[in-house]
């Protein structure tokens, strides 16, 4: 069906009490560049506001382009494994295609029925095999090239072409490690790993995503970490790599990997959005942002950890699909008592209003519109926040949480334990 519809754009707006078939429609929607909005009902604000957002473009063009073709030309030493994203193969086989296929492969051209300014594709390349392992990088001028050609139809009917050509230099040998570290983008790498592991979970039978991510991370740390052999305490990573283990830790716990509490439709929806969004949005999906509001200081980012919870603090969590405003127990009690409406408590009223205004600005700029959850500490809706936090304090911890703090009832390993195991395995 996806192949037959490769010149049309399939859109879907779905509401559910149970599975409605988004998982079955995923291939057709994704390969035609369509979009899906998944909500609890047609009357839910997520669906209504998302539908309204489509028609709010000030240029009367809906912000969309159509009938696109994406083509890649590259040096002979580089092969194209495929693309993970909203496109479909045009079966343009040739010497640029790699024998290993990832996503839409065996081609150097893809159809994009619909695209906008935020459409993002993940292109996976492979190095052509060399007779000698050090054949690459012997010359300082040994460059290789990529050329990306994007044909598309503008909303006024005009066909346009955008050409982007970039070059990179081969490096090899022991002296290349620092140069590779300098060019490493850990946010982009996290987004690529998320797309790759999601694709493998759908394409490979008996695939273990957690083991695959762990092996990849251990290999990276062993290759680029700074340590003494068999001495975990000596292990350290360059600032260019230091946040990447944290991304992988949160990716292992994300909705892309842990599918037990989500329906097949929800999992398909999450992965479709991951496969079309840019790096910044993908990172928010993998590792949500957490902002703290309190009387002692203005809005400030805090660690995604259960220790961030305090009775006199408001937390704003942005996990892309959900925006959570979490009131500490003291703040919640004062709010319920109506202090914000009393004279002399204007500062408290401003404290309550600040995260709401920030949440509104996030929702205003995002499509599909995220769900807004306003909850209190120890309330049932607090699970939307607790599920994303690092469980540094659990029911089994030796040290109880401070007054006004909280704990997480889980047996999952904390980030500290995760890093201890990573350091031990990386230095072997």
Image (cartoon, grey):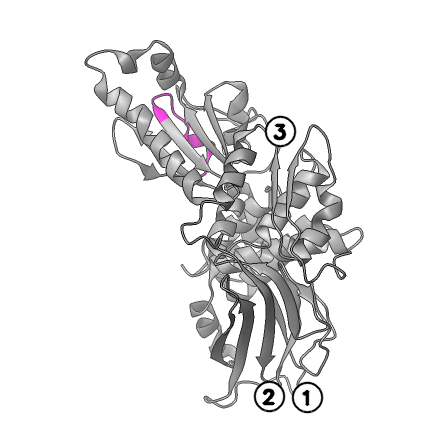
Q: Quadrant of the C terminus?
A: bottom right
Q: CA distance from mark 2 to mark 3?
A: 59 Å
Labelled pair 2, 1 in contact (Cβ < 8 Å): yes
In the shown orientation, is residue 348 left or right of residue 199?
left
Tell which circle, 1 or 3, labels the residue nearer the N-terminal end: 3
Find residue 313 and name its label: none
Find residue 41 and name its label: 3
Label 2 secondary element: loop
In front: 61, or 385?
61
In front: 49, or 302?
49
Q: CA distance from mark 2 to mark 1?
A: 7 Å
180 w.r.t. 94: above or below? above
For label 3, the crowd category at 10 Å Cα-Cα, with few meaning under 14, some 14 to 19 and many 20 or more, is some
> Which residue bears the numbered disc 2?
135
Whether residue 381 appears in this view of the structure is yes
Q: Is residue 399 magenta?
A: no
Tell which circle, 2 or 3, labels the residue nearer the N-terminal end: 3
- The image position of residue 92, as x and y in percent, is 71, 76
For label 2, the crowd category at 10 Å Cα-Cα, with few meaning under 14, some 14 to 19 and many 20 or more, is few
> Which residue bears the numbered disc 1?
131
Q: CA distance from mark 1 to mark 3?
A: 60 Å
Label 1 secondary element: loop
- The image position of residue 51, as x and y in percent, is 54, 40
- Pick out the residue farthest to the left: 344
Q: Which residues are magenta?
A: 302-313
For label 1, the crowd category at 10 Å Cα-Cα, with few meaning under 14, some 14 to 19 and many 20 or more, is few
Residue placed at 42% from the left, 23% from the top?
405
Label 3 secondary element: loop
Q: Which of the two discs, 2 and 3, sits closer to the camera?
A: 3
103 w.r.t. 409: above or below? below
- The image position of residue 292, as x and y in percent, is 35, 33
């Amino acid at each position: 069906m996806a192949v037959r519809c490769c010149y049309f754009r399939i859109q879907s707006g779905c509401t559910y009490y149970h599975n409605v078939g988004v998982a079955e429609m995923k291939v057709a929607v994704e390969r035609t560049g369509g979009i899906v909005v998944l909500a609890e009902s047609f009357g839910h604000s997520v669906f209504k506001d998302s539908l309204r957002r489509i028609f709010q473009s000030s240029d009367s063009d809906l912000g969309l382009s159509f009938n696109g073709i994406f083509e890649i030309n590259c040096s002979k030493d580089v092969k194209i494994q495929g693309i993970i994203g909203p496109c479909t193969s045009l079966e343009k086989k040739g010497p640029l295609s790699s024998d290993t296929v990832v996503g839409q492969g065996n081609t150097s051209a893809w159809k994009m029925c619909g695209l906008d300014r935020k459409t993002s594709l993940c292109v996976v390349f492979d190095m052509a095999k060399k007779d000698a392992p050090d054949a690459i990088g012997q010359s300082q001028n040994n460059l290789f090239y990529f050329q990306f050609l994007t044909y598309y139809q503008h909303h006024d009917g005009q066909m346009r072409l955008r050409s982007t050509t970039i070059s990179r230099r081969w490096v090899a040998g022991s002296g290349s490690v620092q140069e590779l570290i300098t060019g490493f983008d850990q946010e982009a790498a996290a987004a690529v790993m998320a797309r790759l592991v999601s694709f493998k979970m759908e394409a490979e039978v008996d695939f273990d995503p957690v083991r695959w991510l762990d092996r990849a991370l251990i290999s990276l740390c062993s290759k680029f970490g700074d340590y003494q052999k068999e001495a975990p305490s000596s292990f350290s990573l360059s600032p260019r790599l230091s946040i990447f283990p944290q991304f992988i830790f949160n990716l292992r716990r994300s909705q892309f990997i842990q599918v037990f509490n989500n329906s097949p439709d929800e999992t398909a929806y999450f992965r479709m959005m991951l496969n079309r969004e840019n790096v910044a949005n993908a990172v928010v999906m993998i590792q949500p942002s957490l902002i703290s509001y309190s009387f002692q200081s203005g809005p400030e980012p805090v660690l995604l950890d259960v220790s961030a919870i305090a009775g006199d603090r408001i937390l704003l969590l942005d996990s892309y699909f959900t925006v959570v405003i979490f009131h500490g127990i003291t703040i919640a009690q004062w709010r319920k008592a109506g202090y914000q409406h009393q004279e002399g408590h204007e500062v408290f009223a401003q404290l309550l209003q600040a995260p709401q205004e920030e949440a509104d600005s996030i929702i205003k700029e995002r499509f599909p519109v995220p769900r807004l959850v306003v909850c209190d500490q120890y309330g049932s809706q607090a699970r939307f926040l607790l599920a994303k936090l690092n469980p540094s304090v659990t029911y089994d911890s030796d040290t109880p949480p401070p007054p006004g703090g909280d704990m997480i009832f889980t047996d999952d390993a904390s980030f500290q334990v995760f890093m201890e195991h990573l350091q031990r395995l990386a230095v072997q």
